[in-house]
Image: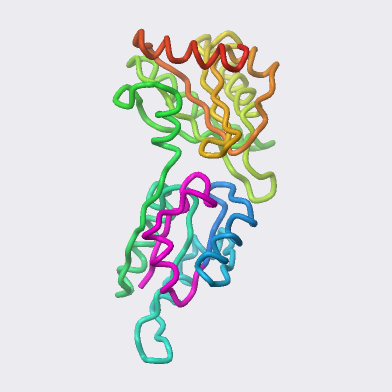
Amino acid sequence: MLLLVGMGLNPKRDLPVGSVEALKGCDLVYAENYTNAIPKEAVEAIGKVIGKNISFLSRGEVEGEKFLVGKAGEKNEKGEEKTIALLVPGDPMIATTHVSLILAARKSGARTKVLHASSILTAAIGESGLQAYKFGKVVTLPYWRENYKPVSTLETIEQNLARDLHTLVLLDIDEKMGPMDPKEGLRTLLCMADEKKDEKINPQTHVVVLCRIGYPEQRVLYGSIASILDGHADATPAAIIVPGKLHFLEQEYLETCAICCGL
């Protein structure tokens, strides 16, 4: 059996009790931290709780699928099907990679099970005070490179704004560069707007920046892009929300965030 186990936003305290018990009964436990940045010590702490060594897998080993699917099809010394677990940041099935992994395991004949946990998709919306049903399509903001400068993120934001909808912008994570910090994300959005001659996204556009949600030091900032770029908003992992048309309660809530962060 292949178990996909969500670690939540803060693995040291968010791993559900039921997941802890399930992990204790596994033959092998692995972890990945490329869909979100998870400190190695947090995974080591989980290992101590469940009494097992946890090995980190590379992006290629997870996306390649054969390694985990092969392990899930093995038998233990009693001739019984092994139970293999993959610890995943947040909630497992949010990432397309993990959906593909479950499908590959099922096609091979292995049993599968998903143990859910908290996700940035719901936590970011909740912490922002914005109404969940007023969000449009979620989008990821990729790192810009010398020969790779897509503007599709901005196009999605434009489409959502045209419908008065909010946009949750997830920030890229690169194996070498690590998680994108929110200031780089905002600068990239401004570059995209300049590239497309889009005046809706400019230094005076108000956004919500959410840093380290789920951790004791989490911060929710609301203000103009210019004011946030001029302040302290470097902590990762982070996400950005570009609000659409605000309800008066949403506006009031965001204004309290602005006061709290001095913006």
Q: Position of residue 177 (x, y in %)?
A: 69, 44
At 60% from the left edge and 15% from the top edge, which residue is drawn?
A: 225
Q: Is residue 137 left or right of residue 49?
A: left
Report the front residue among 64 and 178: 178
Looking at the image, is 66 positioned above or below residue 157? below
Q: Is residue 21 left or right of residue 178?
A: left
Q: Position of residue 9 (x, y in %)?
A: 49, 44
Looking at the image, is 20 positioned above or below residue 154? below
The magenta stretch is 1-29
At 62% from the left edge and 13% from the top edge, which residue is drawn?
A: 262
At 32% from the left edge and 67% from the top edge, which residue is drawn?
A: 112
Looking at the image, is 208 positioned above or below residue 173? above
Colouring of the image: rainbow
For the N terminus, the quadrant is bottom left
Q: Position of residue 232 (x, y in %)?
A: 69, 23
How many numbered marks are there?
0
Is residue 142 rendered magenta in the image? Answer: no
Picture quarter containing residue 27?
bottom left
Report the front residue among 172 and 213: 213
Is residue 15 rendered magenta in the image? Answer: yes
Q: Position of residue 104 (x, y in %)?
A: 36, 66
Report the front residue among 3 and 161: 3
For the C terminus, the quadrant is top right
At 34% from the left edge and 22% from the top edge, which residue is drawn?
A: 131
For this orientation, the residue located farthest to the bottom is: 78
Looking at the image, is 36 positioned above or below residue 188? below
